[in-house]
């Protein structure tokens, strides 16, 4: 498996406190990595370490499988230190300025990128008159000028309205389709869940968990969790009386039933009528936001 980024015990101490605390982060080629944490959790600091805008106190970074970071960082695009947008310039003029600044050879780069970020029809409009979403997309356009393989975006949807969020989402999916691996930080899980393929959750500088989209769906799946004395007997009743095979069996005689979630008492009644002892029965699973909050609260209480 090809990794775009791996960190090993990466840490940053500010004023005697670990704001990034021994982080082992893994991002594979093609991922859209949703980097989630509350404000102050350490997301920006971690991204700055990767981009080379801050020095680690401890630990290592590998980019594209190499520790030659100066070379590899040229393959990263980021909006972290927002490239200055010149307010009295149009989108095209802004991009052309950076093309000259970076000495980018391709003549078509500006046209292609303007179209990609959906700013091709802004004509003479000056960037000071852009909506926040348009400004964000222009910043991303500038970060795309170096033709990056890996894009790191720090809260790119912050402050955007639902339409701006949707446009940003579509842009990121488009970029990913073109082969760009993306790290996108946010404090709102629900928003990321529409595009992320992998998640990393950071809390107080600690990378609490990394998991993929399927894991998350599995963990959040709504079901009735039933603990019984005899799983075989219970399964027969579920299949015969409730006419469903949408269940699985976990250790400790626990059955998760993914249908009938609005009919908990009926399920209970059928099991009891079938002479199964039901030790516990309850709805489980939640939406993504709920899962995130629960995960964070659990960690805060540690
Ligand atoms: P997030 O991006 O998740 O909101 P940050 O990485 O910005 O979190 O901040 C993490 C912690 O590090 C915060 O407590 C913040 O105050 C602290 N911090 C960030 N940058 C500095 C700095 N340059 N000097 C001192 N403390 C900092």
Image (tube, rainbow, N blue to C red):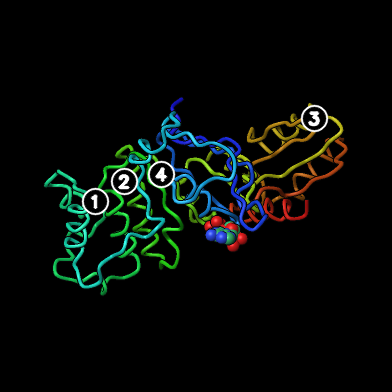
Estimate how packed mark 4 is, as few (under 14), some (14 to 19) or many (20 or more) residues with alpha carbons within 10 Å.
Answer: many
Distance from the alpha carbon under mark 1 to that under mark 4: 16 Å
Residue plotted at (87% across, 33% down):
229
Quadrant assignment, res 8: top right
Write down the residue under mark 1.
116
Which SS class for mark 1? helix
Residue plotted at (69% across, 39% down):
257
Q: Nearer the viewer, residue 266 or 292?
A: 292
Residue 62: give x, y in percent of width and height: 47, 33
Distance from the alpha carbon under mark 4 to that under mark 3: 44 Å
Residue plotted at (50% across, 37% down):
61
Quadrant assignment, res 123: bottom left
Which of labels 2 and 4 is toward the front?
4
Q: Nearer the viewer, residue 256 or 192?
A: 192
Write down the residue under mark 3.
231
Mark 2 CB lies closer than 8 A to ligand 1? no
Distance from the alpha carbon under mark 3 to that under mark 1: 55 Å
Write down the residue under mark 2.
174
Mark 4 or mark 3: name the one nearer the start of the chain.
Answer: 4
Answer with left or right where residue 258 lies relative to residue 52. right
Q: Are marks 2 and 1 in contact (CB under 8 Å)?
A: yes
């Amino acid at each position: 498996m090809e990794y775009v980024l791996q960190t090993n015990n990466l840490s940053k101490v500010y004023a005697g406190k670990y704001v990034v605390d021994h982080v082992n982060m893994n991002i594979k080629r093609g991922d859209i990595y949703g980097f989630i944490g509350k404000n102050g959790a350490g997301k920006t600091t971690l991204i700055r370490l990767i981009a080379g805008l801050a020095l680690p106190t401890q630990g290592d970074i590998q980019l594209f499988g190499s520790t030659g970071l100066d070379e590899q960082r040229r393959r990263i695009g980021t909006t972290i230190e927002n490239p200055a947008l010149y307010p009295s310039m149009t989108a095209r003029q802004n991009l052309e300025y950076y093309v000259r600044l970076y000495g980018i050879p391709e003549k078509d780069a500006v046209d292609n990128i303007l179209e990609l970020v959906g700013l091709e029809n802004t004509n003479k409009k000056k960037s000071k008159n852009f909506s926040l979403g348009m400004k964000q997309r222009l910043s991303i356009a500038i970060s795309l000028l170096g033709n990056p393989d890996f894009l790191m975006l720090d809260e790119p949807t912050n402050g955007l309205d639902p339409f701006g969020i949707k446009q940003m989402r579509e842009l990121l999916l488009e970029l990913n389709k073109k082969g760009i691996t993306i790290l996108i930080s946010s404090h709102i899980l629900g928003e990321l869940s529409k595009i992320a393929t992998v998640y990393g959750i950071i809390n107080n500088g600690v990378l609490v968990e990394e998991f993929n989209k399927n894991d998350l769906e599995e963990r959040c799946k709504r079901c009735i969790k039933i603990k019984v004395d005899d799983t075989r007997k219970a399964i027969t009743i579920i299949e015969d009386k409730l006419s469903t095979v949408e269940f699985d069996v976990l250790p400790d005689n626990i059955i998760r039933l993914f249908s009938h979630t609005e009919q908990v008492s009926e399920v209970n009644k059928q099991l009891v009528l079938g002479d199964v002892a039901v030790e516990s029965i309850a709805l489980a699973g939640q939406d993504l936001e709920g899962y995130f909050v629960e995960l964070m609260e659990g960690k805060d209480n540690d």
